[in-house]
Amino acid sequence: MSSAVIYEVKNRIGWIRLNRPDKRNAINLAMRKELQDVFADVKFNPEVWVAILTAQGSAFCSGKDLTENVPEENPGIMSSRQLHAFQMGIFKPFICAINGACYNQGVGFALNSDIVIMSNKASFGWPQAKYGIGSVSGPSRGAHILPWHVAMWYIMRSKPLTPEQCLQWGLASQVVPHEELIGAAQKCAEEIFENAPLAIRGIKEAARHAQDLPLAARMQIAQMIADRVFETEDAKEGIRAFKERRTPVWRGR
């Protein structure tokens, strides 16, 4: 039986591929459990410095598998909401490489990521209302990233956003030709590797924790985390390398 998620760690990149191409990578219970395990490895495995999330087949993710009649709550398996919250609590960089249609809960995985690279064949959307059901990521994330009238323009009509529109409205970081998608994601990871991994994680942690706080509280949290990062071996190596005019060697400690 094939896995619903393909996961491998290679050169400090945790490659995550949704693997139900015949179902447009719809999220069933098995995929949710496998993503839970994979996300845990990304978070706790010291050999993973960056994660890249993409998918097999022509679609990235069509959302929840509506043909599977199982309850949302299952012992030992995170609910969709818990899984998205767990992904947001991973402070290692997350790159989402959108290879095709990205709808419903699939958009949640993308918006929970730090960098979104889209194929020119991809699209974003929340078409749940077409099927008489509500949306979580649309009103809770899409309507807060997009201007209100723009979000409602797409969500209320169940119309997808093109890659160019995603780039225009800040849902995507980059749009590339389809055949260059994976290479672009790898290049992005390699550019991140030029920086100290604990510094990057600290910056993300500060941004996540302080996202909805007033400025003074945001600065206090960021300073506290920056002080912690300053005591790491990598911080000392970075300062030495700067003085010696050489490229630093990061150890992640």
Image (spheres, rainbow, N blue to C red):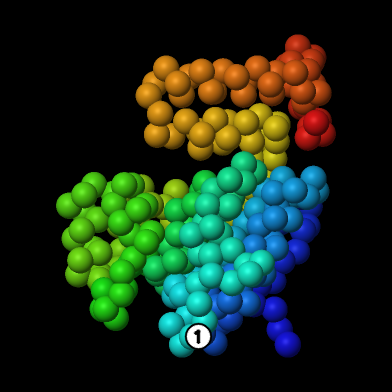
- In the picture, measured across the screen, residue 228 lies left or right of residue 94, that is right
Question: How far across and down, in percent of the image, does residue 68 sit?
Answer: 50, 85
The outermost residue toward the top is: 243
What quarter of the picture does the C terminus occupy? top right
Along the viewing direction, whichever of 226 and 51 lies nearer the viewer:
226
225 lies above or below 97: above
User: Is residue 191 in sight in this rendering?
Assistant: no
114 lies above or below 127: above
Along the viewing direction, whichever of 49 and 41 lies nearer the viewer:
41
Question: How far across and down, in percent of the image, does residue 183 sit?
Answer: 61, 59
Q: What amino acid type should be assigned to the residue bearing mark 1? A: Glu
Residue neighbourhood size for the residue with mark 1, other residues' Cα within 10 Å, grouped as few (<14), some (14–19), many (≥20): few
How many numbered badges does the structure rendering display? Answer: 1
Q: Residue at x 58, y 35 (%)?
A: 205
123 lies above or below 19: above
User: Is residue 103 in sight in this rendering?
Assistant: yes
103 lies above or below 252: below
Along the viewing direction, whichever of 204 and 140 lies nearer the viewer:
140
- The quarter holding residue 237 reads top right
Secondary structure of the residue carrying tag 1 is loop
- The quarter holding residue 1 reads bottom right
Residue under label 1: 68
Question: How far across and down, in percent of the image, does residue 25 sit?
Answer: 53, 77
Q: Residue at x 54, y 23 (%)?
A: 222
Q: Residue at x 70, y 78 (%)?
A: 3
Question: How far across and down, in percent of the image, does residue 239 sit?
Answer: 74, 16
Q: Residue at x 19, y 69 (%)?
A: 157
- In the picture, measured across the screen, residue 15 lies left or right of residue 159, that is right
